[in-house]
Image: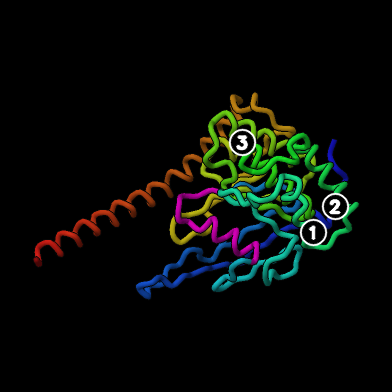
Amino acid sequence: MKENHTNQFLGEVQLINVSKSFLESNKTTVEVLKDCTMVIPKGKLTALMGPSGCGKTTLINIIAGYEKPTSGEVFLDGQPIGGPGPDRLVVFQETALFPWMTVYQNVMFGCTVQGIPEVEAQEKAHKLLQKVGLLDFKDKYPSQLSGGMQRRAELARALINDPKIMMLDEPFRGLDAMTRSIMQEFCSKLFEETQRTTLFVTHDIEEAVFLADQLVIMTYKPGKVKAVIEVDLPRPRHFEMIGTSRFNELRQHALELLYEEATKAFADGMKSAFDLIEGFSRVGSCR
């Protein structure tokens, strides 16, 4: 049964001509994002895909307010994003659980910072730990949990703050294949219950198609939106649909678009390697 959330929990993000450049140590300016325009619809799960180096994590950091764009505008529900806020929460690749806190204390942390009354916070924490299947492990420390359980604890810690948008940056990276599959199905079920706006970064095409309502494909260096694919698979999602013809059509479409960009990334990497070898050769010949 879906939770009856009001629109205050269903944030829509708009990026308009967002560009981001960094100055490297050798004083070279690197343009990571260029004229990136996209919409993350409220109440939908958007999967963000592209080759390494296309600016996916940078884009998340800009939406979260951790970084400012060099140019362009970012809006949440029509209001400009000027910095970090509890209405936008990120679950990163590496675990961010505090190792000295129990699962319960980690989940409660956001409520403590925001000054939410203790009774209300305890009730929310209890419900969320039950929802993610960790109520019996609430007194355990992160080191006592499996990788999948740590991921679930991090999701509960983020959800307790009632963010308008959740951003997950390759959250299942490093998990074994079986645990990853279980977490994908769990994440899909959790999204379908909450209908909370979600941006999910992944390199796994099958994972993206299974979870998402739309796929956003990024170009390689500088990153901008190459294509948006609407995923019209019915919900609730079950792994049986991975073998359907429609699932395979969507996966193939995404694969073709990503292959073009991955080829560019590979060629760029080979060029960099050859340039490095040539540089070493020059140094050697000068000795």
Q: Residues within 10 Å of mark 2 (few under 14, many from 20)?
A: some
Q: Which residue is mark 1?
A: 112
Check disc 3 and give the amino acid type.
Answer: Ser
Asked if marks 2 and 3 touch (Cβ < 8 Å), the reply is no
Q: Secondary structure at mark 1?
A: helix
Residue occupying the point 27% across, 54% down? 273
Give me the C-alpha separation between circle 2 and circle 1.
Answer: 8 Å
Q: Which residue is mark 2?
A: 121
**From what the image shows, is residue 12 above or below residue 66?**
above
Q: Is residue 64 magenta?
A: yes
Q: Which residue is more in the foreground, 112 or 231?
A: 112
Q: Would residue 155 appear left or right of 202 to someone viewing this image? A: right
**From what the image shows, is residue 270 above or below residue 185?**
below
Q: Is residue 240 magenta?
A: no
Asked if marks 3 and 1 touch (Cβ < 8 Å), the reply is no
Give me the C-alpha separation between circle 2 and circle 3.
Answer: 25 Å
In the displayed image of the protein, which residue is found farthest to the bottom?
27
Among numbered discs 2 and 3, the one appearing first in the sequence: 2
Give me the C-alpha separation between circle 3 and circle 1.
Answer: 26 Å
Q: Position of residue 106 (x, y in %)?
A: 72, 50
Q: Which residue is mark 3?
A: 146
Q: In the rendered image, is residue 212 in sight?
A: no
Q: Position of residue 237 (x, y in %)?
A: 70, 32
Residue 163 occupies quadrant:
bottom right
Q: Position of residue 269 (x, y in %)?
A: 33, 53
Q: Which residues are magenta?
A: 49-65
Asked if marks 2 and 1 touch (Cβ < 8 Å), the reply is yes
